[in-house]
Amino acid sequence: MAHLKLGEILVNQGLITEKQLEKAIEDQKKEKGRIGEILINQGIISEENMSAALGQQLGIPYYSSENVELLQPRHDQSLDKVIPGDFAKKNGVLPLSKNMNSLTCAVIDPLDLLMLDNLRRLANCEINLVVATRTALNKAITDFYFKENKEQGKTSLLNRAVESSYEISKDVQGPIESKDKISASAELSLDKLIEKAGEAPVVKLVDLIIRQAIDERASDIHIEPFENKINLRYRIDGALYNIPPPAPHLHLPIVSRIKILAKLDIAEKRLPQDGAITAKLEDRTVDIRISTVPTIWGEKVVMRILDKAAVPLELTNLGFDVKQIEMIRKCLAMPYGLFYITGPTGSGKSTSLYAAVCETIDPKKNVLTVEDPVEYKIEGLNQVAVKSDIGLTYATTLKAFLRQDPDVIMVGETRDLETASICVRAALTGHFVLSTLHTNDAASAITRLMDIGVPSYLLTPSLVLLQAQRLARKLCPKCKEPYEPTPDRHGGIEFKSDLVYQAKGCDECNGTGYKGRVVIAEVLPINDSIRSLISRNATAGEIKDQARKDGMATIFESGIRLVNEGITSFDEVCRVSVDF
């Protein structure tokens, strides 16, 4: 019966009627799908019915739920090296065994000719097929490729990528021996170093490390040398993950390759250096900031990935509630004033600052920015990068800006009295100024500015809005687990929602329970009552108490709102909030 079509086999087996087949064929013309998938989606047949019929149609074995134990790859043949896990998961393929020039694979769709052609090219041998249901095969793929990494709390995709890079690294100097130490590799001559940095395996290795980091939504890549090893770590959603590293003898060629791309001096290993790389992906451009510092074992490299496609620079997509967005936009519509975004390092201040300044872009306005360095290149902004070594500081650039007929000025960070004074005076002379400051909450920004020397009589008329924020991890939508909250479990806090969610962990989020991050913020508009407190040098606590009386939601209270909405967990809000 192998010559029969799938629909005819299902009719002959009494699983569907002729009428149901005719309807499925009509639906196929509209939906452009497979008959079997359409019948499954309509609930007419099961996955097992379709897989068994496919096996019969093509004359290949079918592994049902009754003999699912057959979906066990041979562990002594290193089949995960023959077919990588990402290809297996994406295409629904599981290698089971290899015999001479023949590889047996279980597949979901044996009629996918493009996949089969890619499989033959990848395995470089003949392919014998067995068919299995999607559910059974996906579970077997997860157990074979990803279960061990999940149990170890590591991100499987990262591990597989760097395992591949380790294989590439062997091509450079052959097998790794005990003498392959970071200190020994420092003896390479500069000529040989340049030569090795340009070798194809090193180029592929650096490209792979960067590309995998971008694919995994990493914000930073850390390459750290030690006596007998390299540490490779990615920062994902604010947490650093250790990755199996390349061979130790590749440290200098890797660093040199990165320096060449960033146009840095590869001969200078005693001083810190900063640079940038522009990476071209399929449909977007990613900017990468490079920083090197000399350690006792060699140069440590940190690459900051700035991907506009991964971080939407829009206020509505960052996590603010409707009321907070209204207050921010009302502030941004003012013709002059001073708007500060505050928070510790890594709290997303720069992203929120860019989102805010993007709201001011208008052909009728002259918008200027001074940054150290320029993180995102945005059309419509006149952006200047600070270069302290030639005297181009925040203060000197701001003085020049005031002669450039500005409407809006964005200052990347207020670091000293001179910069703060110019920002304040620019706001008082008819310009709208946005900047960032390192404080724990919004009210503390006022006392910080006073502490560095800005008088209260200048702050009172210039400040229009203060915003403090943190970044909380978002719960993975695939595996977040609901539970009923109780005051005893949450320190007496009551929730509006009957059910809230906690982290669980799955393959989609690499076992962490979280995927992506969201802003939790407090927004403090400067009204008359706050100005009165500023003018008499009130403490941060007094200003915060008044702001809460005026209706300000604190960072913790904003976080609880996100817990009620199922976006993050109570544990995560407590981790990042200063109020609890």
Image: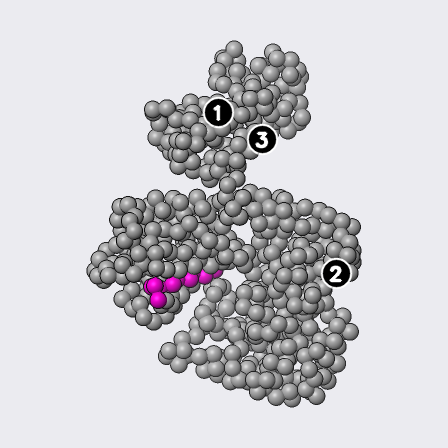
Query: Residue 144: x and y, percent?
Result: 49, 35
Residue topped by disc 3: 135
Q: Quadrant of residue 299?
A: bottom left
| Front label number (3 vs 1) | 3
Does the magenta run of residues contain 258? no
Residue 443, image x, y percentages: 66, 76
Query: Which residues fall within the magenta stretch?
Result: 296-306
Mark 2 burial class by Cα count in 10 Å: few <14, some 14-19, many 20+ = few
Which secondary structure lies at badge 3? helix
**Where the C terminus falls, by quadrant?**
bottom right
Q: In this view, does 97 lie above or below 180?
A: above
Is 11 situated above or below 31?
A: above
In the picture, residue 446 is in which quadrant? bottom right
Q: Do the residues labelled 2 and 1 touch (CB within 8 Å)?
A: no
How many angstroms separate mark 3 from mark 1 (CA)?
A: 16 Å
Q: Kindly indicate whether the residue at mark 2 contacts the one at mark 3 (C-beta within 8 angstroms).
A: no
Regarding mark 1 in the picture, which secondary structure is present there? Answer: loop
Please give the name of the residue rendered at 26% of the width and 54% of the height, measured from the top-left corner: 196
